[in-house]
Image (cartoon, rainbow, N blue to C red):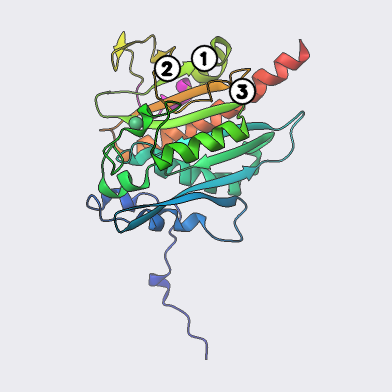
Amino acid sequence: MHQLAPSSTVRKTSGKVFTHFAKEKRGRKHYREVLAPLQNARSPWLPATLGKWNVGADSYALEQYLFVGPRGGGDYVRVGVFAGIHGDEAAGIAAAIRFLHELAQNPEIARGYELYVYPLCNPSGFEDGTRHSRSGRDLNREFWAGSREPEVQLLERQIRTLRFDGLISLHADNESNGLYAFALGAQVTQHVVEPALQAAEKILPRNCNPTIDNFTARNGLIRKGYPGMLCAAPEASPRPFEIVFETPHHADLEAQIEANLVFLRHALDQYLQLQAVGQDL
Ligand SMILES: [Zn+2]
C-alpha cells in the first residue's frame, strides 16, 4: 500500500532552498548541489554545460540556463545575466537561481527577451568561500586580456558568440553600505539603471557617496568600467548595454537577494520600454 509521508515532513522548499547554502560553513557546499534545482530536464529553461575543467582532484563546470520569454513586439532582445564571478558573493548567485524560478512562474517578466543566465561563474571560489577562483585570480580582472582561466575563456566564448544586446552582472561589495551600479551608455543609465535603482532602494539604501570603490560616483551610479571586467567583446559594435549591480555585502542576505530581483525585473522592463520608444521615433 502506498504510504503517505506525514504532513509535518512535507515542507515547501520554495524560497528556502536558495538561502540555506549561504549559512553553510565556507567550502562545505558543493557547487553542484546549489545548481541541482535548475537541472531538472522538464524545466522551462534550457540548461547547457559550456565546459568542464579540473582543479587538482576536483572537477568543475560552467553552466548556462536559457529562458526564452513570450514573443514581444520586435526581435528578441538577448541579455546575459552573470553572477558569482566572485565566489564569496552569495546574494547574486541566489538571486540568479531564484530569478529563473520567477521566470518559470511568470514568463511575462521575460516578454521579448532571450535571457542567458549564468548563476555561478566561479564555482571553485564559491566552494572555497573566496572572491578569487582557486587559481588565486580575480576573474573579474581577466576578461579580454588573453586569460588562461577556464571560467574566463568559456564566458568570453559565449559573450563573443551570442553577441548580447545587454549584459548584467550581479555583485556584492563588502565596503559599501548601500546599493550602486556601474552603467555604460547615457540612455541606459538614465532610463534603465536609475529607475531600477529607485525600485531596489525601497529594499536597501542607495550608496550616495561621491566616491565608491575609488570611482567617481553620482547618486550611486558609476559611468565607466575598468580593465578586465566581464563585459562585451572589444570588437562588439554597437556596444550592448552593460550594467554591474552591487549590493552591500554586509546587509541582510534576503534583502540583498530581493534587491537583485527587483533590480533585474525593473531593468528589463525599462529597457524594453526604451526600445519601444526608440522604434517610434
Ligand atoms: Zn564582486
Q: Amino acid at mark 2?
A: Gly
Q: State the image quarter where residue 145 is shown.
A: top left
Q: Is residue 189 magenta?
A: no
**Image coords of residue 268 (percent x, y):** 58, 29
Q: Residues within 10 Å of mark 3 (few under 14, many from 20)?
A: some
C-alpha separation, residue under disc 3 versus residue under disc 2: 20 Å
**Image coords of residue 70 (percent x, y):** 71, 40
Q: Report the span colored magenta.
A: 197-205
**In the image, which is nearer the foreground, mark 3 or mark 2?**
2
Residue where numbered disc 2 is placed: 225
Residue 271's disc number: 3
Q: Amino acid at mark 1?
A: Thr
Q: State the image quarter where residue 95 is shown.
A: top left
Q: Is residue 201 magenta?
A: yes
Q: Earlier in the sequence, mark 1 or mark 2?
A: 1
**In the image, which is nearer the foreground, mark 1 or mark 2?**
2
What residue appears at the point 44 percent right and 25 percent down from the top-left corner? 244
Q: Nearer the viewer, residue 154 or 182?
A: 154
C-alpha separation, residue under disc 1 versus residue under disc 2: 13 Å
Q: Amino acid at mark 3?
A: Tyr
Q: Is residue 209 visible?
A: no
